Amino acid sequence: MKLQKALKLKNTLAGEISSLQQLIRQKNQYVEGSGIDLTAFDTRKLYDDLLAKIEKLVNLKLIISEANLEIQDKIFRISEYKSLIQFWQGMPVVSGIISSTSYAGTSSTTYVSQWSEVEKMEMIKRYQNLIDLLQEELDTHNYTTEIPFTL
């Protein structure tokens, strides 16, 4: 199986696990004599299915992790560059006089920024470009790497 397909399967399994957990919670209890027959759902059997899916997911994650060892630095860099983009997006860069009105009257404050709006946007663009380059490398790795996993 290609790594790219395994990553999709990982997401699918995680979704199935979440759905099973929700179904078990919903169908485990019912009001006796209510006429609602939830006994059609054997929550103990569903729980066994849940544990089997979790085991499959853990094994798949281990195999994916092993396959990604050679590119782990790229995965970590993408994550950190995304954090830097969020950092820069939140960076205040207002410079100049800002007036505000409140119940006490009008006041003005002069702001000076060490980083400009242009520099802020350049940094965001820089890190997005780095992410895009790294993501291309990851995509190539994911589409070309074969892993030993069968459904």
Image: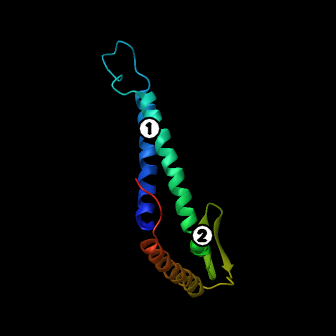
Q: Residue at x 44, y 56 (%)?
A: 11
* Left or right: where 24 falls relative to 131: left
Q: Residue at x 45, y 77 (%)?
A: 140
Residue 69 marker: 2
Distance CA(mark 1)–CA(mark 2): 30 Å
Residue 3, by quadrant, is: bottom left
* Left or right: where 29 falls relative to 63: left
Whether residues under marks 1 and 2 lie with C-beta atoms below 8 angstroms apart, the answer is: no
Residue 20, by quadrant, is: top left
Question: Tag 1, which secondary structure?
Answer: helix
What type is the residue that disc 2 sits on?
A: Leu
What type is the residue that disc 1 sits on?
A: Asp
Q: Look at the image and tell me in which quarter the N terminus lies.
A: bottom left
Residue 49 marker: 1
Residue 9 marker: none
Where is residue 66? Give x, y as percent: 57, 64
